Every structure is written in C-alpha cells, then in structure tokens.
Image (cartoon, grey):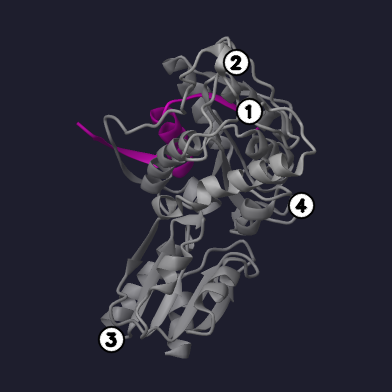
C-alpha cells in the first residue's frame, strides 16, 4: 500500500533517488541543498549504499562520476556557487556519456549571493553552463510530490540516455513541507550493458537509439574514458569524421526522443486570451492567481514547463490561437522568457515579470500583472 508522509522537498528528492536505485551520493553541504545530503547520509547505508562528503563541490561530482563508472546509480546535489563549480565535470560526464543525477536547489546570486533566499536564476546555466554542445534534460519540480516523482524520472532518463540529468528545484520547493504519497515501488530503468564478449566490445559503438551499451569498471571489459572528443574506442581523435560523429550523436540522442522526454501541464486554455507561463515554485502562485481570476470571469490560462530542457516549444506553439498575451513571471532578471519569446514569434505579445529580491511572487502580484493587460 502507498503511504502518506509529510516531507520536505529536499527529503523527497533524496528518497526519490533511493527509490530509483541510487546507491552512491558524493557531495558537499551548501545551503539550501544540504538536507539532500543529510538524508542520504542517513538512508543510503540502510539499503547498502555509500555516502561520502568530499572536500568541495568539484570533488563531489567527481566522486559521483567515479561511482557511476563502476555501474552504480549516483547522485550529487548543490546550490548556486556549487553548481558553477560542478560545470567542468558536468561537461566531462556529457562527453564521456556517464549517467548521473545532479540536483541544483536554486538560490540568489551571483557569487555567494543570497544563500537562504529563493531564485530561479540558474535556468540558462543548466542549458549552457558547461562549454560545448550537448543534449540537456532538466526537470523543475513545483511540489514535494514532484520532487520525489521527478527524481525517479531523472534517474531513469539518465540511465536510458547515458548522460547527466538535472533537477532544477529552488529554495522554496526544497524547504517546504507538505503531503506526499509514497508508492510501494517505482518503475526503474537500468543502463544497457554489453551483450558481446569482452574481446568484441567497442566502448562507444552506439545502438540504433544512438546510446552505446555501458560496461562497468571491474566487469572485465577494456574501456578508455576521456573528456577529449573520442572515436568509438574511446580514444582521443583529430579525425574530422569521428569528431562530427561523436559531437552530433550526443546531441541527437536527446533531440530525436524529445517528444518522449518533454513534460508540461496546463489549465484553462480552451478560451484563454491571456496565458501565464511559469515553472517551479512560481507556478504555485501563478495557478492560484489564474483560478481566482477565472472566478471573476477573466479569460486566463496557465502553462507550466515541467522539463525546462528540452523546452516544450512545440507544445507551447500549439496552444489555441485566441491567446493574445503571454505573461512570464520568474525569479530572475528574465531567462525563460527568452524561450517563450522565441516560440511565440510574434503570435502573441510576451510580457516579462521578474523578481530578484529573494522573495517569492505572491498570487496577488501575478493577478495584478494579468489584470493590467486584460
């Protein structure tokens, strides 16, 4: 029987990871993500897993990468400055095609910024923080239930596509406590393993889905791992054909399945003339504002990207043609609004509403923005 709990968002992320099969956590404490590490430190040993606190954020993700190479599902979590520090090794994991889950509990910045205040200012860093081109999968939970469920999905997508997957939560969602229904079991996905003898194994020879089977260190397979662009054998290459093959494939393996990855939710779109697009904690305030305005007869609807990346552009573009104005409230100086503007492309006026003082949007503030243009 599923059980009902009263959990904090960060705890739900940790428990979702364990439910998905995570058995290694490497990290470093940083507000407001520290509770993820604290729960992992307590719970992982109970299921035969390992927790290690490293000397810094760079070492935390490096340890998680090392664990993933041995065949273990691994996770690390951080906030703001730590996410910046993890970017080089995050890029390494994209290039070497190493599955792991990276959690960013967003807080105000730049630099040390606002350690205890909410922000959504890492949205573009999630997509472009590490140099080079690669496919990105990033989820944005808006509730404690989401925090659990999307962590399970993050692990499954990481294993399926053999790459890092990001959970872009924020201080409010990470620290709020609310009801959650915890299932007895969850559906899990495990990475593909080689089906050929060791002497026939080509480490980066991809299957038809563009994802190569992954051997674990210690299984008897020879496998060279590098952050340099490599050929199918995993060795560095300067051959233009091999470079194009590798670079194109690590983008294509996500792009070709974007319809299976992208998630979103919407409400009251059938006759909406004004649309509010929001994600994470802001979507909670936005939904309340939309429902209160609907009760007053205002034709307003809500669209929430659950996957920030890939961005649900096709889904947003296919909205009813009666939408004339789109309001994008977010806790940064205007990041996801750029994607909305790209998608709407003159079909509707896009209005940015930003808040960067560490506070959360109140429903009344979003309602006022809607009424201003109604």
Q: CA distance from mark 4 to mark 3?
A: 44 Å
**Mark positioned earlier in the residue sequence (4 or 2):** 4
Q: Secondary structure at mark 1?
A: helix
The residue under the point 50% across, 78% down is: 344
Label 2 environment density (alpha carbons within 10 Å; few <14, some 14–19, many ≥20): some
Labels 4, 1: front one: 1
> Is residue 123 shown above or below 22?
below
Labels 1, 2: front one: 2
Q: Picture quarter containing residue 68?
A: top right
Span highlighted in magenta in the image? 1-28
Q: Secondary structure at mark 2?
A: loop
Label 4 environment density (alpha carbons within 10 Å; few <14, some 14–19, many ≥20): few
Labels 3, 2: front one: 2
Q: Picture quarter containing residue 203?
A: top right
Quarter the N terminus occupies: top left
Question: Residue 180's x, y, as percent?
Answer: 32, 43
**Residue for badge 2:** 217
Given residues 64 and 254, the one toward you in this image is 254
Q: CA distance from mark 1 to mark 2?
A: 12 Å
The disc label shown at residue 65, or none: 1
Query: Label 2 near label 4: C-beta < 8 Å?
Result: no
The residue under the point 61% across, 27% down is: 64
The disc label shown at residue 26, or none: none
Question: Residue 115's x, y, as percent?
Answer: 66, 49
**Residue for badge 4:** 111
Number of disc labels: 4
**Mark positioned earlier in the residue sequence (1 or 3):** 1
Quarter the C terminus occupies: bottom left
The residue under the point 64% across, 23% down is: 66
**Mark positioned earlier in the residue sequence (1 or 2):** 1
């Amino acid at each position: 029987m599923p059980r009902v709990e009263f959990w904090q968002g960060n705890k739900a992320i940790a428990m979702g990871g364990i439910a998905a099969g995570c058995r290694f956590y490497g990290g470093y404490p940083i507000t407001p993500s520290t509770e993820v590490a604290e729960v992992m430190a307590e719970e992982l040993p109970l299921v035969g897993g390992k927790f290690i606190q490293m000397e810094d954020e760079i070492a935390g993700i490096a340890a998680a990468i090392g664990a993933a190479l041995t065949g273990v599902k691994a996770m690390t979590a951080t906030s703001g400055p730590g996410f910046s520090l993890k970017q080089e090794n995050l890029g390494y994991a994209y290039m070497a095609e190493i599955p792991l889950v990276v959690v960013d509990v967003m807080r105000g910045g730049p630099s040390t910024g606002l350690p205890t205040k909410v922000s959504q200012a890492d949205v573009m860093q999630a997509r472009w923080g590490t140099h080079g081109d690669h496919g990105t999968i990033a989820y944005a939970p808006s509730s404690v239930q989401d925090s659990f469920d999307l962590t399970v999905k993050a692990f499954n997508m990481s294993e399926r596509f053999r790459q890092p997957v990001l959970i872009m939560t924020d201080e409010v969602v990470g620290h709020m406590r609310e009801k959650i229904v915890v299932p007895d079991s969850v559906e899990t996905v495990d990475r593909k393993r080689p089906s050929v003898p060791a002497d026939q194994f080509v480490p980066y020879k991809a299957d038809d889905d563009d994802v190569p089977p992954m051997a674990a260190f210690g299984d008897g397979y020879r496998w060279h791992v590098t952050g340099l662009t490599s050929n199918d054998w995993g060795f560095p290459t300067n051959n233009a054909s091999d470079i194009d093959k590798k670079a194109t494939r690590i983008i294509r393996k996500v792009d070709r399945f974007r319809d299976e990855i992208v998630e979103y939710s919407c409400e009251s779109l059938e006759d909406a003339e004004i649309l509010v697009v929001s994600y994470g904690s802001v979507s909670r305030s936005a939904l309340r504002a939309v429902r209160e305005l609907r009760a007053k007869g205002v034709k307003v609807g809500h669209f929430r990207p659950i996957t920030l990346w890939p961005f649900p552009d096709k889904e947003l573009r296919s909205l009813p043609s009666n939408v004339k104005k789109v309001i994008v409230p977010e806790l940064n100086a205007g990041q996801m609004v750029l994607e909305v503007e790209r998608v709407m492309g003159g079909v509707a006026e896009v209005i940015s509403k930003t808040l960067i003082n560490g506070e959360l949007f109140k429903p009344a503030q979003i309602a006022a923005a809607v009424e201003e243009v109604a």
